[in-house]
Image: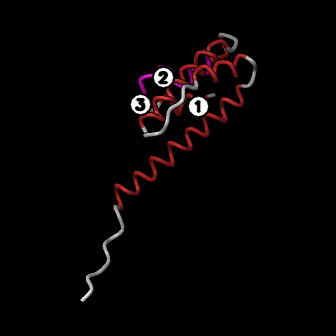
Amino acid sequence: MYKIAQGFYYTQTYERVNTTPGVTVLLFFLTCGIYGYYCYYKWGRASNEIAVRHGRNGSEKAVLYLILAIFGFSIINDALIQSDFNDWLSIQQSGYQQQHYGAPPPPGASY
């Protein structure tokens, strides 16, 4: 939960939990897990926002994450969120390579 909170804390999204990762984990334990439901809901909304920003078809995952967390399947939420993080990272890296390395040089002039 700490690493997921850290990933969303350092991502610029409108829909995000505005607490540091350490405070998120502390509130999770102090509220006996209820704060986790809120976090998963907000992370689902943030996932949709980030997917749309990266040009992907964003699907609303907030309710799915909330239902899975309520029924004790938070590990599935963690796997889904990690998969989203991996997708965004690959998109950013490919954009970085295209931006900094550009297209391959044109073929040499033929005489």
* Magenta region, residue range: 13-26
Name the residue tied to disc 2: 16
Which amino acid type corresponds to the residue marked 2 in the rendered image?
Arg
Which amino acid type corresponds to the residue marked 1 in the rendered image?
Ile
The quarter in which the N terminus is drawn is: top right
- Give the image quarter of residue 30: top right
Q: Residue 92 or 10: which is nearer the viewer?
A: 92
Name the residue tied to disc 3: 12
Name the residue tied to disc 1: 4
Q: Residue at 35% x, 63% y: name it.
A: 103
Question: In screen coordinates, is 11 left or right of 67?
Answer: left
Question: In screen coordinates, is 52 left or right of 78?
Answer: left
Q: Secondary structure at mark 3?
A: loop
Q: Earlier in the sequence, mark 2 or mark 1?
A: 1
CA–CA distance in space, label 2 to label 3 = 8 Å
Q: Is residue 14 magenta?
A: yes
